[in-house]
Structures are given as C-alpha cells and as structure tokens.
Image (cartoon, coloured by chain):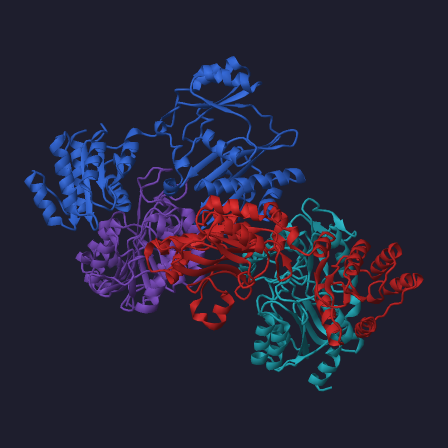
Chain colours: A blue, B red, C purple, D cyan
Amino acid sequence: MNLHEYQARALLKAAGIPVPDGEVVTTPEEAEAAARRLGGKVVIKAQVHAGGRGKAGGVKLAGSPEEARARARDILGMTIKGLVVKRVLVVPAAEIASESYAGIIVDRASQKPVVMVSPAGGIDIEEVAARTPEKIFRVAVDPRYGLLPHQAMGLAFKLYRQIDQVRAAARILEQLYRVFIDAGASLVEINPLATTPDGKVLALDAKLVVDDNELERRPEIAAMRDLDSEAPEEVRAREAGLSYIKLDGTVGCCVNGAGLAMATMDLVKYYGGEPANFLDIGGSSNPQKVVAALEIITADKNVRVILFNIFGGITRCDDVARGIVEATGKTPLDRPLVIRLTGTNEDQAVAILKEAGFSALTDMDEAVRQAVALAKERA
Amino acid sequence: MNLHEYQARALLKAAGIPVPDGEVVTTPEEAEAAARRLGGKVVIKAQVHAGGRGKAGGVKLAGSPEEARARARDILGMTIKGLVVKRVLVVPAAEIASESYAGIIVDRASQKPVVMVSPAGGIDIEEVAARTPEKIFRVAVDPRYGLLPHQAMGLAFKLYRQIDQVRAAARILEQLYRVFIDAGASLVEINPLATTPDGKVLALDAKLVVDDNELERRPEIAAMRDLDSEAPEEVRAREAGLSYIKLDGTVGCCVNGAGLAMATMDLVKYYGGEPANFLDIGGSSNPQKVVAALEIITADKNVRVILFNIFGGITRCDDVARGIVEATGKTPLDRPLVIRLTGTNEDQAVAILKEAGFSALTDMDEAVRQAVALAKERA
Amino acid sequence: MSIFVNRETRLVVQGITGRDGSFHARQMMEYGTAVVAGVTPGKGGQKFEGRVPIFDTVAEAVAEAGANTSVIYVPARFAVDAILEAADAGISLIVCITEGIPVLDMVRALPYVRERGCRLIGPNCPGAISPGESKVGIIPAQICRPGSIGVVSRSGTLTYEIVHQLSRAGLGQSTCIGIGGDPIIGTSFIDCLAAFEADPATEAVVLIGEIGGTDEQEAARYVKEHMTKPVVGFIAGQTAPPGRRMGHAGAIISGSSGTAAEKMEALRKAGIGVMARPAEVVPLLRERMGR
Amino acid sequence: MSIFVNRETRLVVQGITGRDGSFHARQMMEYGTAVVAGVTPGKGGQKFEGRVPIFDTVAEAVAEAGANTSVIYVPARFAVDAILEAADAGISLIVCITEGIPVLDMVRALPYVRERGCRLIGPNCPGAISPGESKVGIIPAQICRPGSIGVVSRSGTLTYEIVHQLSRAGLGQSTCIGIGGDPIIGTSFIDCLAAFEADPATEAVVLIGEIGGTDEQEAARYVKEHMTKPVVGFIAGQTAPPGRRMGHAGAIISGSSGTAAEKMEALRKAGIGVMARPAEVVPLLRERMGR
C-alpha cells in the first residue's frame, strides 16, 4: 500500500526526523490560508500515487498566499497518470544548499533491509543507479540488530564532511530505519534529503510503501489507505478477497492463481487479443467470490468477452461452476462467456454448467483462442 | 544491584504479570491498615536483601488486621543475616493449589539468557537443581529474537497440562523475559509461580537482580537502590568510585585491581591472618581515591593494621603515595601501615613516602607477613 | 529418486486440526506420505483420523514420532513462530504453505532457520511432491506421474497446468516444487537447480518464473555455469503493468526492473529453452532431451 | 612465536584521540607495535603524534592503512558499536579494554562478531602482549620479557604480579593475555589454551583464574583431554564471601557454585599444578617443566 507524501512525512516527523511544517488541503481557499500561516514562498504539491508529479505540472511554487490559491486551483482536479488530484500539500519553499537521497528497501538478493544513500539527490534514483552507480552507497542491515550507529555514520560520511551534518544525517538514517520497521514498510525514501544554507539537514519529500501483509497488525497504518485514490473496482475487488488490476484490453479474465492469471493474460496477447484485467480469485473456491468477480469484470465497459480459466486443485471446479450459474442467474450476461476448467470435480462442474446452458472447455489454449476470436467479432 | 521483593513485583505487575495486590509499609500501624484494606488473612514479609527470610522468621501469617500489626511489630527491626528489617510487604494469603518456579539468568556457559522452569517450586531452586535436576527445564534464548512463543509454550507444558494454564504460564514467561531485558537484569525469579484452586496462575514472590553496568542508562531502576539496606561504608565506597566489601577480619586491605585484591586477602589468610575487607581502588591512580579508601578502612574498628598492595601499571605508585601522605597528614593514623608498591613510578613513590616517614616494601609476601604479624601483636 | 521429499520423509503437520491442515493431511496420507505426527497445542495425546498421534509441540513430534520434515498450515500470524519451532526442534525440511506472512518477519526468521542447518521451502507455496514417493503440501497428486522431469516454480496453479501437460504427454516428474510467490523465500531456484543437477533420477528441468526480482536471472547464470542437464523455462507476466503487485507479493515490476522480457532474455542467453506459452513445454523438452 | 598478537599485527586504535586511547597508543608505539591507524569520527584526515593517520571509520582504516587488529578505548556506552564496527570492517582480532559494558549488550554482540569470523578479547580486559613482538592493550611492557611461558588470566594487576615473578626469575613469556573480568567475554581460557598448545614457541602455560562461573573447570577438562604442555594455575578469591561481586562483574560466587575451592580441586584433578600463592609460580613451573 502506498502512502501519500503528507502521510509519510507525518510518520517521519513523529519519529523525530526534521521535516518542514506543511499543511494538506483540498480547496484553493484552504491553500491560501495555509500559505498565509506558513509565511513567505510556498510550494504546492499534488498528493497522488504517481511518480513524475513535477514533470506533469503537479508541483508549483507560489510567491504569495494569493498565488498559492491560484496554483492550488491549477493542480486540484488535474489528472496525473490517470489519477485525479484531490489534495495538495502546502509547504514552505526551503532554501537549499545541497540535495541528497536516502532510502531503505527490502533487498530480495541479500534478503535483508538495505539502506541506500546518494549525494546525487533530488532526481530519480533509478536514473542515478543506471548512469552513475558509483554514486549510490548501500549497507545491508542485519534485521536482528537494526541499523547500527556506525553503519549510519559510515553512510552519512558519504554525504557530508562537516561532522555536525554527518551526525545529523546519521540520526535521520537511524530514525528512518525505525519508521521503516515500525510501519512494516517495503520501501521508504527521502528525496531530497537537503541541507539548508545555514547547515541544517532536512527531509523535503517522503515516500513510503507498506507491505500489504503488515496491515492486519497495524490498523493505524491500514487506516491511512486512501480509497479515493484507487480505482473503485479495485477497492471492491479487495473487499471481496480478490486480487484485481484493471487494464485497457477487451478480454475479461477470471483465473485461480496469480501465476496462471498472468499466463492467461499473456496467452490472450499471444493470440492477438488484449487482456482487460488481471484477476485472481485465489485458492479457496467460494462461489461468492466468483459472483463478485463477474460483477467487477462486467462493470468494465471495455470488456467484450469473459474468459474463465480454472485449474482445480484446492479450488473446486464445481464451486466455480455454481458461482457462474448463480451470478448469471441474477443478472443475465450481455457478453459471451468462455469457460475453461479442469482438475478437481471437473465432471460435476461440466454437468452444472451444462444444465444452466453453458459449455466448458478443458484446454487453455483453445479457450483463449475462442475468447480472442469473440472479442474481435464484437469490436 | 538487588531489588526488594516489593520493587520486583511492581515491575512484574507493570509488565502485565498477575501479581496479588500488596502494600509495603514501615510501621505496625500501617501494616494493620493495609491488612484491613486487603481483607481476610494476610502474609507479612520482611523486605531485606537476604535469602532464607522464611527460616529466619521474616515471613508470618496473620489472621486479622490486629494480628497483622503484631506480626509486623515482630518483624520490623529484626536482623536477618546482619540486615535490619525496615520495611514489610503485606499481601493477601492466597490459597494455593500448586507451586512452580520460573526464572531467567544470563548463563555464562552458553552466553545466552536461559529461561528455567520447574514444577518443584516454592523451595530453594538450588536444592532442586542439586537433588532432582531432572525437574528443572531450561531453554537458552537467542537474545536477538527474545523468548519465542513456542519456547514459552514448551516450558509451560512442563508445568501444566490444562491448556488455559499453559497459555497463562507461557504469557507470564514472555512478560518475565520482557522485564528481564527492560530492567537490564542478570537474574529474575518468580518462586512460587502458583496456581489457585480456581485455576489462575499467579506470581506470589519475585526476585530481581540488576546488572550494575545497566544502571547508568536506566535511571528509573537506579533510583530503586535502597541505601538503607546496605552497609553505610559500602555506600560511601561506591560513591568514591571504590569497590569495597566489608569482612570480619583485622587486616585492612587496600589494593589496585580486583584479582590482586582477592589474592592479597587470600595471602593474608595463608599467613594466618584474617582480611578485614576487599577493596579495589581501580585502575586509575587518583590520590583522592586513596584518601577515601583510608577513611573507609580506618572507620572499621576491627582493623588492627592497614596493608597497601599496589602493582603499578596504569596506576602510578607516586599517586598512591601522595594519597597516603595526604590522608595521614589530615588525620594521623592510630594503627600501623604496611605498604607494598612496585611498578610504574615506584622510585618516586618510595621517595615521597620516605619524606613523610613511611617505609615501603616491594615484595607482596613479605608485606602480607608483616601485616599479619602486626595484627597478631595488637590482638 | 527425487529431491527434498522422498520415501525417507517422515512428516509432522503443524496445524493438523485446522480446516486446511486436516484436509491436506488426509490428502497426503491417502497419497502414501508418511504422516507420522500432527501438532496442535493443547491437543497432545489425541489421534488424527484415529491413527496419527497429535502432540503439543514439534519437539515432541520429533522425539516421539521421529518426524524429520514439517508442513505448516497455521494462520499467518502464527506461522513464523511455527517455522522457528520446527527449526528449534531439529526438523531438517520445513514447508510453509501459509500465505500473508509479512516480509520483515521472514527477513528475521530466515537466518534463524539456516543457523540450525534447516531448509525452508516457501512461505506462500504449494509445497513439493515426488510422485510415487511422497507429497508434502497441496499440489494435486492426480496430475502428477513418476518420471524424470524436475519442475520448479514460483507459482501454484500455473505449475499444475504445466505438470498436467507433462503427465498427459507421458513425461513424468522426479519432483515438482513450488518455491513460493513471496519476495523473500527460504529456497531459491538455484537451490532446486543444484539439487536437480545432483539427483540421478532427474534428466531435465522445467523452471517456471514470473515478473519481479532477479531470481530467474540468477538462476540463468547458475544454469549456464553449473548445469549439464537440459533446462526449459517459462516466465509469466509479459503483459503485466509496472509497479502493480500481480497477486503474489513478489510479482511486481519495480521501476524498469524485473520484467518478463528481461528474464526471458536472460534465460535465452544462458542457453535455456524459453516457452512462449505453457503448451510448448512438451515439444521444447523433447527437443532439448533429444527424444 | 606467540598467539593472537605478533609481528603481523597491524593495529587500529578506536578512540585514539581520547584520554586513555592517546596515552596507551603512545605506549604501544613506543613498544614497537605497528599502530597503523586511529579512528575518531570527525577527525579523519588528521595525524596522531604527527604520523599515525586518523580515520572517520574503521572501514577506512582497514581499506587505507591495512589494519587487521583493533583495540578499543571508547567509553562503555559507545564500546559495543565500536566492536560491531570493527567486525563489520573485516578486522580479525578485536581487543576491548573498556569496562562497564552491560552483559546483555555483550550477549547480543558476540554472535555478530563470531558470524564475521572475528575474535574478540575482552571486554574489561588488559589486552595481550607478545614480548618483543607486539603489545595490544595496557599490560605494562617493562615487566615482560620474551620467552616461552604462555600466561592467560581473568585479571589485570594479579597477572602483572605473576608475570613480574616470571620475568625476575628469567622465565620469559611467549604471550600474556588478560581475557577479562566480565561474565560474558569473547575469548575463553580454552581458546587461549588451544592456541598455546598449538604455538611452537610456548613450552608451558600459567592460568590465572578467580571465583565465579565455571570457566576454570571447563579449562581443566580441556587441559586434561587435549594438552600436552605443562600447565600451572592460580585461583584468586579463596576468602571471598558468597553472593558478593568482588570488583569484577564476573567474580561472584552464586549460591554454592563458583568457589575457589571447587576450581582448585578441578585443576588438581586435571593434573594442573595449583599454586597456593602467586610466589609459587616459578618453583612450580620449574618443577613441571623439569628444569
């Protein structure tokens, strides 16, 4: 789960990291009032879960409260990478002497949290990694010990020479590691970690991604989820226990298992179609999940054909068949359905579907080919 | 540093461990009032840093508030192993169905915290260990992970069969481990860990010893030190940065280094004398420490002769000599002084002492023999 | 022969009285797996299905029933402790089926397991089956057949799909392993490839990867440097958008890294036969095996 | 020859600009120890005594000055991190002089050090000296002489007393080590005994123990089972009362265990010559060495 910048900076601030004051607002008038309270020049920053806000015009400088209102009006309501901006953060425009980067990820190769810093901050760190990898410094942390003081100091010495700044940066890294662990994060970043002309070290931007598996035991973090910023059908899918991601194609997919769901999408593409979504109904075979899945897929107006691909293992094919019959019984489908199922209780499933007037295939390639053909017919 | 039972049980209670209510009081009248508030039968327990309180008459049952006052009067002011009882704990007399033991130490062999339980509780655990070692169950804890839930459960199953009691005991062990770590303890014990007839699991007594090296960073624990319960000369020694333990002999010892101090005491005994104390002035050679050491030794009226044994390394012999001259200049000694010093700045030290009218030896055996002979002369 | 699970496997089922645990314990027993014990704290002394002894702790299951392998079906919030308990008890192979364990928990648990000389498969995996010998986990036994193809995969049902194709074509399996869809897992592709290379009963290997991370790239390097047996591979997620978690916690393209295209390219460069779709597994394997 | 510290020792002094660190750095340099670097964060780039480079981190001291051994003089509250820093930097021998480190901190630190293949001597110890080769720590050099007696001890000044007796009698030392007076330490008697047994330059060993714990008993068992060289021993604290900490954090008789009497008995049973007083070390060694 992604946090908004304003949420991430609140967590950093609570951990003791120096973060400039700021206010998150939803109207141009509030932005003006906030700018007045903060005084001086301010920056208005769109709060959306999308990279490249700056390039998209989602970050603007304002010299006065009135200008803050104008800039907030420009940004609020704009669409960045498909997401509508509903909130802006108003922060003082800090004078900056230098910009660095600090971040922590869980590194899959070392299987440890890795703390990274770079004196080349303020820009996309992936670009730095690609072009000048020698400017990124890493320490793999033994999670049983946490980020040790000497490790934080060692990294801080890569950013600064002046010992007060080194100590300040080391303290920030230790605090950042605390935030990372306490929030159950998979990524946390400060970019830029800036110094001011008078030598202070500050976090000017913050990014935090939380491991979804942590949310159950961290209700205070889970409560930060911003449903407004997600596609409503994805919210509904999550509530129904489904894993769903909307795409731009025309073949709606309903599959059991993430790997098979991806392979099904790939096969749609292979046969010349375009998948409309990723959808994994998961391992258990609850007919209600099938009903919810069908509702979500059919709500997508781009979908021209619906493809079921079920490999019965723990998932029982008859349960899936029952879900299909129940869902289509309530609301008859206005688009064709191609069903492939094989494995556990396959025969019963075929019988149930037959009785309801559906036919079923057992071969995945054949099913995908049919679905793609139907989608093309209905173009 | 030893905590009193009432202090240890407060820490346990704060950690969530079920501990019966209780009040610590300093007068028989307060004991009566406490017994009245608690209701029913109570137990009056002497709060002193000594084992075997029960056998010494320091733990008494009282059937009524009036009796509580009488028993408190018996116990307050009594002397147990040389320590005067200044406080008693008044607790309800719990009905007990079973008594177990639970404790945690830092094990020197495995270099880990070891959690121990025994169904043979309520009695001296050392006796259990000696006579029926098979009744003690141990788990060495990886301190980087803490006491794991399954480890706590595994130990709890050694005490109880009923799953609710097992879970309750496991929870108590996990909480006890938290107390152990959070207090910087070297030992924590619940003895007995009792069950009541209605199946509850309770800590009826608590013992906690804190690592002295933890006190600097745990001021709230350090504040629990009860200076009343320590020999005043030991308190003074600690304040002066000396390590001093009073014994019953007549040869007062002043040595640099703990090992050499013990070896000096042993040599006094070897030559037929009795050491009056252990005293280590430590590694640094501050004349003020020597002055304080002499004050503390001479305050012991049993001391008939004072023996210095200094092996100069970091300790500079001349500093020690200066301390001796300064201290005896202020208050002339009423008892003979035997000085042995060798090592760093030995020659200067001998010159300083000579000028003040003292002579010095360089051989340890010779010095100890002289001191013992002087002590015998003055018997 | 086979890898990791075999006729020597003496299994303890952690969470044997739970909904999933009891269902799959029965399935494994029916398949012939030596299920020698179950563990549910507080139910020690009872029997599962009238014959498998239940213990309060894994330590007892090891001491009294001689268990050497454990399979875990307990809920996510208890699963890490279950793993550590098995490792402490001297179990040598732990298969953790449970999904939803926080990554930072696994990051702490893995060194504990490894310091005790123990192998963990998973979490969030379907387990392993050596057809005709032993099944530990949830892979449907009816789609498998004994044979000489090793299968290793990050996914569940996609593995079944491919195993199904193999079995229908008469290509049986030495062992099929799902290593799990999480970003931090106990047993990697490389661990399995090395074991298959060393296993005399395995003639060729099918590797089924997906987007996210660089495990497949490292596996490709390993194949190139250390393997003599033919390997064919499939990568799921060619059409996955970047930055989105595709069901599995580990299946996410970060920035521009972890794409299916780069993984397929790495496999090809290492001389691995790459399938465009699952149905190609049989012809590709036949070609590589020269039969 | 010698053990642990020798002519190959390239020392970095952690806390070289502190009061104790600078004093002893000078002493070690005077003795001829190769002090190749000092560490004080924020003073990187400066020189100590005009010639030893100071670095901000131990990693730099290793990379740029080739340090392989570290000695730590920093205050107790920074000492554990200093130990871990040295271990992380690839130092192979760390000598921690600092006194007053909490036991629970050492309990956590030791596995970290050992996992990195590093040896820690101490904490709360005087260090080690191989006379004529190298001195790391605070043992007064003037009392030592090169020779063939290995000395290992839990104490400081008592060691000096005994070494002094040896040197006066012409019995020089291969290496003298103080392992430290704390209950949890990095290097045990056994570690040192094994090293002395393997060291061709060591002919006999003096072991100086004290009350508390069972290290001497374990050492006695080791001597009996594994050592061919003569060993003589002394135990301080025959007159120590139970339950009281005698200066050293580790010198405490717990209940009835850890007494000098039981330790002396264990040494005797293992065939170790036991001194009643320090002055007996020379005649006893001569007797045991047959000269």
As drawn, B281 above or below D173:
above
In the displayed orientation, state which residue is furthest to the left. A355
- Where in the figure is residue B198, as x and y percent of width and height? 34, 53
The location of residue A339, given as percent across then percent down, is 15, 41
The residue furthest right is B355
User: Is any atom of residue C228 visible in this view?
Assistant: no
Residue plotted at (43% across, 61% down): B100
Q: Quadrant of the N terminus of chain A?
A: top left
Q: In the rendered view, does A225 fall on the left or right side of D20?
A: left
Which residue occupies the foreground of this view, D291 or B35? B35
**Residue D178 image offset from top left, x and y in percent:** 68, 66
Q: Is residue C160 visible?
A: yes
Query: Residue C79 in the image: x percent, y percent?
Result: 35, 52
Residue furthest to the top = A66
Q: Quadrant of residue D144?
A: bottom right
Q: How many marks overall?
A: 0
Extreme residue toward the bottom, this view: D290
| Towards the viewer: A157 or A168 | A168
**Along the line of sight, the residue nearer the viewer: A59 or A174:** A174
| Occupied quadrant, residue D193 | bottom right
Quadrant assignment for the C terminus of chain A: top left
